[in-house]
Image: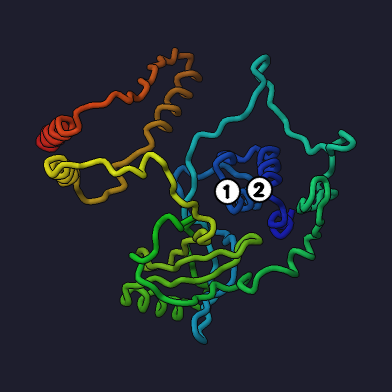
Amino acid sequence: MATKTLEMLSKSELYERAQAADVPGRSQMDKDELIEALSDGGHEPKSKPSTSKRSIWNGAITFGLITIPVGLYTATEDRDVSFHLLSGKDESRIEYKRVSSKTGREVDWDDIVKGYEYEKGKYVVFTPEELEQIAPESARSIDVVQFVDESEVDPIFFEKSYYVAPTDVAVKAYELFVRALAESGRVALAKVAIREKERLCILRVRDGMIVLETMKWPDEIRQAEFEQLEKKPRVSAQELKMARQLIDQLTGEFDPKVFEDSYRRRLEEAIEDTIEGNEITVNPAEAPTEKVVDLLEALKASVEQSKTRRSA
Protein backbone atom coordinates (compact mmCIF):
# COMPACT_ATOMS: atom_id res chain seq x y z
CA MET A 1 0.00 0.00 0.00
CA ALA A 2 1.25 3.47 -0.83
CA THR A 3 2.63 5.62 1.96
CA LYS A 4 0.06 8.32 1.22
CA THR A 5 -2.75 5.89 2.02
CA LEU A 6 -1.07 4.86 5.28
CA GLU A 7 -0.79 8.51 6.30
CA MET A 8 -4.56 8.84 6.03
CA LEU A 9 -5.15 6.11 8.62
CA SER A 10 -5.59 6.71 12.35
CA LYS A 11 -3.11 5.30 14.84
CA SER A 12 -5.53 2.54 15.86
CA GLU A 13 -6.01 1.54 12.21
CA LEU A 14 -2.24 1.51 11.67
CA TYR A 15 -1.79 -0.61 14.78
CA GLU A 16 -4.28 -3.17 13.48
CA ARG A 17 -2.33 -3.42 10.23
CA ALA A 18 0.95 -3.69 12.14
CA GLN A 19 -0.57 -6.49 14.19
CA ALA A 20 -1.69 -8.31 11.06
CA ALA A 21 1.83 -7.88 9.60
CA ASP A 22 3.38 -9.05 12.89
CA VAL A 23 5.51 -5.89 13.19
CA PRO A 24 7.88 -6.22 16.20
CA GLY A 25 7.56 -3.59 18.92
CA ARG A 26 4.34 -2.18 17.47
CA SER A 27 2.71 -1.64 20.88
CA GLN A 28 5.36 0.99 21.73
CA MET A 29 5.34 2.79 18.36
CA ASP A 30 3.81 6.17 17.70
CA LYS A 31 1.97 6.93 14.46
CA ASP A 32 5.07 7.96 12.51
CA GLU A 33 6.92 4.79 13.49
CA LEU A 34 3.94 2.58 12.58
CA ILE A 35 3.79 4.17 9.12
CA GLU A 36 7.54 3.74 8.66
CA ALA A 37 7.43 0.09 9.80
CA LEU A 38 4.50 -0.76 7.52
CA SER A 39 6.10 1.04 4.58
CA ASP A 40 9.26 -1.04 5.07
CA GLY A 41 7.26 -4.24 5.12
CA GLY A 42 7.44 -4.73 8.90
CA HIS A 43 10.98 -6.06 8.88
CA GLU A 44 12.76 -7.08 12.06
CA PRO A 45 14.65 -4.22 13.75
CA LYS A 46 18.42 -4.14 13.35
CA SER A 47 20.61 -5.36 16.21
CA LYS A 48 21.66 -1.77 16.84
CA PRO A 49 19.49 1.34 16.39
CA SER A 50 20.33 3.24 13.22
CA THR A 51 18.85 5.91 11.00
CA SER A 52 16.37 4.64 8.45
CA LYS A 53 17.34 5.21 4.82
CA ARG A 54 13.77 6.26 4.14
CA SER A 55 12.69 9.76 5.19
CA ILE A 56 9.29 10.06 6.85
CA TRP A 57 8.81 13.62 5.51
CA ASN A 58 10.33 15.69 2.72
CA GLY A 59 10.24 19.46 2.42
CA ALA A 60 12.47 22.43 3.14
CA ILE A 61 13.74 24.61 5.97
CA THR A 62 12.76 28.20 5.23
CA PHE A 63 13.95 31.33 7.03
CA GLY A 64 14.01 34.74 5.44
CA LEU A 65 14.49 34.14 1.73
CA ILE A 66 16.61 31.03 2.32
CA THR A 67 15.22 27.60 1.36
CA ILE A 68 17.07 24.38 2.24
CA PRO A 69 15.51 21.15 0.85
CA VAL A 70 15.66 18.47 3.56
CA GLY A 71 14.18 15.19 4.76
CA LEU A 72 13.20 14.09 8.28
CA TYR A 73 14.44 10.80 9.70
CA THR A 74 13.30 9.22 12.96
CA ALA A 75 16.09 9.76 15.50
CA THR A 76 14.93 7.37 18.23
CA GLU A 77 13.27 4.00 18.51
CA ASP A 78 11.78 1.89 21.27
CA ARG A 79 13.65 -1.34 22.04
CA ASP A 80 11.09 -2.85 24.40
CA VAL A 81 10.30 -6.57 24.20
CA SER A 82 7.12 -7.10 22.17
CA PHE A 83 4.43 -9.54 23.29
CA HIS A 84 1.52 -11.08 21.42
CA LEU A 85 -1.90 -11.48 23.03
CA LEU A 86 -2.83 -15.17 23.30
CA SER A 87 -5.72 -17.20 24.65
CA GLY A 88 -4.81 -18.53 28.09
CA LYS A 89 -6.53 -21.83 27.28
CA ASP A 90 -4.70 -22.95 24.14
CA GLU A 91 -2.17 -20.13 23.43
CA SER A 92 -3.85 -19.27 20.13
CA ARG A 93 -3.34 -15.74 18.78
CA ILE A 94 -6.01 -13.13 19.53
CA GLU A 95 -7.29 -11.40 16.38
CA TYR A 96 -8.93 -7.99 16.11
CA LYS A 97 -11.52 -7.39 13.44
CA ARG A 98 -13.16 -4.22 12.16
CA VAL A 99 -16.84 -4.88 12.87
CA SER A 100 -19.78 -2.57 12.18
CA SER A 101 -21.66 -1.75 15.38
CA LYS A 102 -24.89 -1.69 13.36
CA THR A 103 -24.67 -4.91 11.30
CA GLY A 104 -22.10 -6.90 13.27
CA ARG A 105 -20.31 -7.65 10.00
CA GLU A 106 -16.61 -7.16 9.28
CA VAL A 107 -15.82 -4.00 7.27
CA ASP A 108 -13.16 -3.83 4.53
CA TRP A 109 -10.42 -1.22 4.83
CA ASP A 110 -11.57 0.42 1.59
CA ASP A 111 -15.02 1.04 3.10
CA ILE A 112 -13.73 2.85 6.20
CA VAL A 113 -13.93 6.66 6.37
CA LYS A 114 -13.14 9.19 9.11
CA GLY A 115 -15.94 10.90 11.00
CA TYR A 116 -16.10 13.53 13.75
CA GLU A 117 -18.95 12.97 16.23
CA TYR A 118 -20.55 16.38 16.94
CA GLU A 119 -23.67 14.89 18.57
CA LYS A 120 -24.43 11.42 19.87
CA GLY A 121 -24.59 9.21 16.78
CA LYS A 122 -24.15 12.12 14.33
CA TYR A 123 -20.92 12.55 12.37
CA VAL A 124 -19.20 14.91 9.96
CA VAL A 125 -17.45 12.63 7.45
CA PHE A 126 -14.27 13.60 5.59
CA THR A 127 -12.70 11.95 2.57
CA PRO A 128 -8.89 11.76 2.23
CA GLU A 129 -9.09 14.36 -0.54
CA GLU A 130 -11.00 16.80 1.69
CA LEU A 131 -8.48 16.39 4.49
CA GLU A 132 -5.68 17.14 2.02
CA GLN A 133 -7.38 20.38 0.98
CA ILE A 134 -7.42 21.72 4.55
CA ALA A 135 -3.81 20.72 5.27
CA PRO A 136 -1.80 23.56 6.88
CA GLU A 137 0.51 25.81 4.87
CA SER A 138 3.49 24.25 6.65
CA ALA A 139 2.75 20.85 5.07
CA ARG A 140 5.96 20.97 3.01
CA SER A 141 8.14 23.40 4.92
CA ILE A 142 9.83 23.84 8.26
CA ASP A 143 9.04 27.53 8.63
CA VAL A 144 11.43 29.25 11.05
CA VAL A 145 9.60 32.07 12.83
CA GLN A 146 12.27 33.20 15.31
CA PHE A 147 15.47 32.26 17.14
CA VAL A 148 15.56 31.86 20.93
CA ASP A 149 17.95 30.78 23.68
CA GLU A 150 17.50 27.04 24.26
CA SER A 151 17.28 27.63 28.02
CA GLU A 152 14.02 29.53 27.41
CA VAL A 153 12.27 26.41 26.10
CA ASP A 154 10.86 24.21 28.88
CA PRO A 155 11.57 20.49 28.08
CA ILE A 156 7.95 19.68 29.01
CA PHE A 157 7.05 20.89 25.51
CA PHE A 158 9.32 18.35 23.75
CA GLU A 159 7.60 15.45 22.01
CA LYS A 160 9.78 13.54 19.53
CA SER A 161 13.20 13.90 17.89
CA TYR A 162 14.05 13.73 14.17
CA TYR A 163 17.31 14.07 12.27
CA VAL A 164 17.13 16.69 9.53
CA ALA A 165 19.34 15.80 6.55
CA PRO A 166 19.79 17.85 3.36
CA THR A 167 19.20 16.70 -0.19
CA ASP A 168 22.26 16.44 -2.43
CA VAL A 169 21.76 19.94 -3.88
CA ALA A 170 21.39 21.62 -0.49
CA VAL A 171 24.52 20.43 1.37
CA LYS A 172 26.31 23.81 1.30
CA ALA A 173 23.25 25.80 2.43
CA TYR A 174 22.62 23.20 5.14
CA GLU A 175 26.23 23.41 6.40
CA LEU A 176 26.00 27.20 6.49
CA PHE A 177 22.82 27.00 8.56
CA VAL A 178 24.37 24.44 10.94
CA ARG A 179 27.48 26.55 11.58
CA ALA A 180 25.57 29.81 11.95
CA LEU A 181 23.07 28.25 14.35
CA ALA A 182 25.82 26.59 16.42
CA GLU A 183 27.85 29.80 16.68
CA SER A 184 24.79 31.82 17.66
CA GLY A 185 24.18 29.59 20.69
CA ARG A 186 20.47 29.65 19.91
CA VAL A 187 17.81 27.32 18.56
CA ALA A 188 15.30 27.99 15.79
CA LEU A 189 11.62 28.03 16.70
CA ALA A 190 9.55 26.81 13.75
CA LYS A 191 6.27 25.30 12.55
CA VAL A 192 5.93 22.09 10.58
CA ALA A 193 3.09 19.78 9.55
CA ILE A 194 3.71 16.02 9.86
CA ARG A 195 1.07 13.33 9.46
CA GLU A 196 -1.94 15.64 9.19
CA LYS A 197 -0.99 17.68 12.26
CA GLU A 198 0.71 21.05 12.46
CA ARG A 199 3.33 21.16 15.19
CA LEU A 200 5.49 23.68 16.91
CA CYS A 201 9.15 22.60 16.85
CA ILE A 202 12.70 23.69 17.46
CA LEU A 203 15.79 23.10 15.32
CA ARG A 204 19.04 22.61 17.22
CA VAL A 205 22.56 21.46 16.37
CA ARG A 206 23.79 18.08 17.60
CA ASP A 207 27.03 16.46 16.42
CA GLY A 208 27.27 18.73 13.39
CA MET A 209 23.74 18.24 12.10
CA ILE A 210 20.26 19.60 12.69
CA VAL A 211 17.86 17.83 15.04
CA LEU A 212 14.19 18.75 14.96
CA GLU A 213 12.23 18.41 18.21
CA THR A 214 8.46 18.44 17.77
CA MET A 215 6.65 20.20 20.59
CA LYS A 216 3.27 20.30 22.28
CA TRP A 217 1.16 23.44 21.82
CA PRO A 218 0.79 25.55 24.98
CA ASP A 219 -2.86 24.53 25.45
CA GLU A 220 -1.79 20.85 25.45
CA ILE A 221 0.26 21.26 28.64
CA ARG A 222 -1.77 20.47 31.75
CA GLN A 223 -1.70 22.76 34.76
CA ALA A 224 -0.05 21.20 37.82
CA GLU A 225 -2.59 21.40 40.63
CA PHE A 226 -2.07 19.24 43.72
CA GLU A 227 -3.81 19.99 47.00
CA GLN A 228 -1.05 18.37 49.06
CA LEU A 229 1.43 20.93 47.73
CA GLU A 230 -0.62 23.99 48.66
CA LYS A 231 0.77 23.93 52.19
CA LYS A 232 4.46 24.81 52.44
CA PRO A 233 6.09 22.78 55.25
CA ARG A 234 9.01 24.29 57.13
CA VAL A 235 12.44 23.11 55.93
CA SER A 236 15.32 23.71 58.34
CA ALA A 237 18.66 25.14 57.28
CA GLN A 238 20.38 21.91 58.39
CA GLU A 239 18.05 19.76 56.27
CA LEU A 240 18.65 21.97 53.24
CA LYS A 241 22.42 21.86 53.80
CA MET A 242 22.43 18.03 53.97
CA ALA A 243 20.20 17.76 50.87
CA ARG A 244 22.56 19.99 48.88
CA GLN A 245 25.53 17.99 50.15
CA LEU A 246 23.87 14.78 48.94
CA ILE A 247 23.30 16.38 45.51
CA ASP A 248 26.97 17.38 45.39
CA GLN A 249 28.01 13.82 46.29
CA LEU A 250 25.91 12.36 43.47
CA THR A 251 26.94 14.94 40.85
CA GLY A 252 29.02 13.77 37.87
CA GLU A 253 29.45 13.98 34.11
CA PHE A 254 26.53 12.63 32.10
CA ASP A 255 27.54 9.44 30.28
CA PRO A 256 24.50 7.68 28.75
CA LYS A 257 26.58 4.55 28.04
CA VAL A 258 26.70 3.64 31.74
CA PHE A 259 22.91 3.28 31.90
CA GLU A 260 20.90 0.30 30.71
CA ASP A 261 17.32 -0.94 30.67
CA SER A 262 17.70 -3.54 33.44
CA TYR A 263 14.07 -4.64 33.17
CA ARG A 264 14.42 -5.39 29.45
CA ARG A 265 17.66 -7.30 30.10
CA ARG A 266 16.01 -9.44 32.81
CA LEU A 267 12.99 -10.03 30.59
CA GLU A 268 15.17 -11.18 27.69
CA GLU A 269 17.08 -13.48 30.05
CA ALA A 270 13.79 -14.91 31.32
CA ILE A 271 12.67 -15.57 27.73
CA GLU A 272 15.93 -17.39 26.96
CA ASP A 273 15.68 -19.42 30.19
CA THR A 274 12.13 -20.45 29.34
CA ILE A 275 13.08 -21.48 25.79
CA GLU A 276 15.93 -23.59 27.19
CA GLY A 277 13.60 -25.21 29.72
CA ASN A 278 15.08 -23.55 32.80
CA GLU A 279 12.89 -22.55 35.72
CA ILE A 280 12.35 -18.82 36.28
CA THR A 281 12.84 -17.63 39.83
CA VAL A 282 10.40 -14.91 40.81
CA ASN A 283 11.54 -12.38 43.42
CA PRO A 284 8.50 -10.45 44.66
CA ALA A 285 9.02 -6.70 44.63
CA GLU A 286 8.76 -4.92 47.95
CA ALA A 287 5.91 -2.45 48.19
CA PRO A 288 7.03 1.13 48.81
CA THR A 289 6.53 2.25 52.39
CA GLU A 290 4.80 5.44 53.45
CA LYS A 291 6.30 5.28 56.92
CA VAL A 292 7.37 8.72 58.13
CA VAL A 293 11.10 8.82 58.84
CA ASP A 294 13.38 11.39 60.43
CA LEU A 295 14.26 13.42 57.33
CA LEU A 296 17.50 14.83 58.69
CA GLU A 297 18.78 11.42 59.84
CA ALA A 298 17.85 9.89 56.48
CA LEU A 299 19.77 12.64 54.69
CA LYS A 300 22.85 12.09 56.86
CA ALA A 301 22.73 8.34 56.22
CA SER A 302 22.32 8.95 52.46
CA VAL A 303 25.37 11.24 52.39
CA GLU A 304 27.47 8.65 54.22
CA GLN A 305 26.26 5.89 51.90
CA SER A 306 27.15 8.01 48.86
CA LYS A 307 30.65 8.66 50.24
CA THR A 308 31.17 4.93 50.75
CA ARG A 309 30.08 4.12 47.19
CA ARG A 310 32.32 6.77 45.63
CA SER A 311 35.37 5.55 47.56
CA ALA A 312 34.72 1.89 46.69
**Distance from the alpha carbon under mark 1 to that under mark 2:** 8 Å
User: Percent x, y for residue 276?
Assistant: 47, 17
Asked if residue 202 is positioned above or below residue 220 in the image, the reply reads below
For marks 1 and 2 on the same chain, the one whose residue lies earlier in the sequence: 2
Residue located beneath label 2 in the image: 11
Callout 1 secondary element: loop
- Residue lying at the far front in this picture: please name it: 231
Q: Amino acid at mark 1?
A: Asp
Name the residue at 36% across, 66% down: 152
Percent of width and height locating residue 288? 35, 25
Left or right, 59 with respect to 66, comes to right
* Up/down of 193 relative to 156, above or below: below
Instruction: Looking at the picture, tell me which residue is in the foreground, 257 or 172.
Output: 257
Q: Secondary structure at mark 2?
A: helix
Q: Is residue 278 above or below residue 207?
A: above
For residue 296, what is the image quadrant? Answer: top left
Confirm or deny contact between disc 1 and disc 2 (CB under 8 A): yes
Left or right: residue 145 versus residue 150 is: right
* Residue 139 sits in quarter: bottom right
Q: How many numbered discs?
A: 2
Looking at the picture, which amino acid does disc 2 mark? Answer: Lys
User: Which of the pair 189/97 is nearer the observer?
Assistant: 189
